[in-house]
Image (cartoon, rainbow, N blue to C red):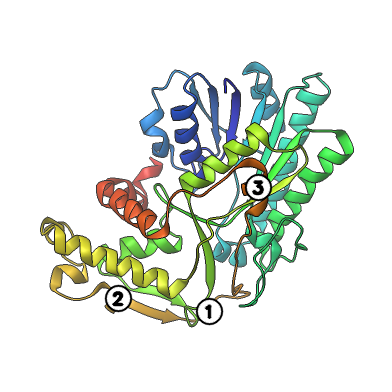
Amino acid sequence: MNKHLLVTGAAGFIGANFVHYWLAKYPASRVVAFDALTYAGNRHNLDDVASHPGLRFVQGDIRDTALVERLLQEECIDTLVHFAAESHVDRSITGPDAFIETNVVGTHSLLKAARTVWLDGGVDDHRFHHVSTDEVFGSLGPEDHPFTETNLYEPNSPYSASKAASDHLVRAYHHTYGLKVTTSNCSNNYGPYHFPEKLIPLCLTNILDGKPLPIYGDGKNIRDWLFVADHCSGIDLILQKGRLGETYNIGGNNEWTNIDIVNLLCDKVDACFAADPSLAKRYPKAPAAQGKPSNSLITYVKDRLGHDRRYAIDASKIMGELGYQPSVQFPEGIHKTLQWYLANESWWRSIQDGSYRK
């Protein structure tokens, strides 16, 4: 597909993985990687593709409507893939304003720019794809059916409420103005470049440094986990074959409690240390380097406010209509993720000490 893409949030976790995925699969494409480089945006996430002739990086804020309009015009953009978002629930509880600004005002800014350049400019062949979350649907009970695209929106945190608002804006611009849009609601992603404040990379790096593994409440909160490359392939299918104005759930059919995930991580790390004695020298503070199990670091902490008990995605729509199938099973994906973090220590160390922002 020889498209001209503007990818927002392209230096973040999922956005960067999508840029890698897209340029590898469609090397003739033009990709403008757009990111404000706030704390979770890391320009180094794109180092491996920085020399690609089809890639241009632009630092900018999605709320800068004039800048977005200019990029859409001068780069002849026909596809906008919108990842940019404030996404950490804990941060939304302590500081919700940034989530409203980025996720609601920022999304509206992009929609206005797209309307001006594409609709008012007579660009019929265009697509605005909006990346959202399963958290807009609220919380599931233990026996409830996983979320479908027709579930009512019942967001329970400032983060999920801001994403719900942005979803509605995208839908409104399609039905009111005729903007050609699609939306995807994904389950929890994991994989390379995952910012180390999130559960899986936080626990991986804490194990290696011998730090506590904080588990909220009883650890029985359930999430549906999706390897990030599978998410990228799902978006690709939506861009190719998705029906305009439709929403598609992208999930991994992979529900795990938080405590079971952490125990799996601990087992994987312990197995790596047993197979490779050099790891004990690299990470002397890790329990496995001292003959102890990594799960000795597990520490239960006070549950966070409004903590949803369970999320799960029913991805039958995208599977049936577009032929989507997640290809990476969770134990395999966790192994791949662990190996990536072991091979890229300088990347996550630079985040720990803040040097990635220099």
Q: Identify the residue position indicated by label 1 in the image.
A: 303
Residue type pointed to by label 2: Asn
- Answer whether labels 3 and 2 touch (C-beta < 8 Å): no
Q: Amino acid at mark 3?
A: Gly
Asked whether residue 105 is in view, the answer is yes
The residue beneath circle 2 is 295
Do the residues under discs 2 and 1 have CB atoms within 8 angstroms?
Answer: no
Q: CA distance from mark 3 to mark 2?
A: 40 Å
| Residue at 29% over, 75% down | 295
Helix, strand or loop at mark 3: helix
Which is more foreground, mark 3 or mark 2?
Answer: 3
Residue 351 image position (x, y, % from top left): 37, 50
Badge 2 marks a residue whose secondary structure is helix
Residue wearing tag 3 = 320
Q: Is residue 90 shown left or right of residue 273? A: right
Q: Is residue 316 left or right of residue 48?
A: right
In primary-sequence order, the first of circles 3 and 1 is 1
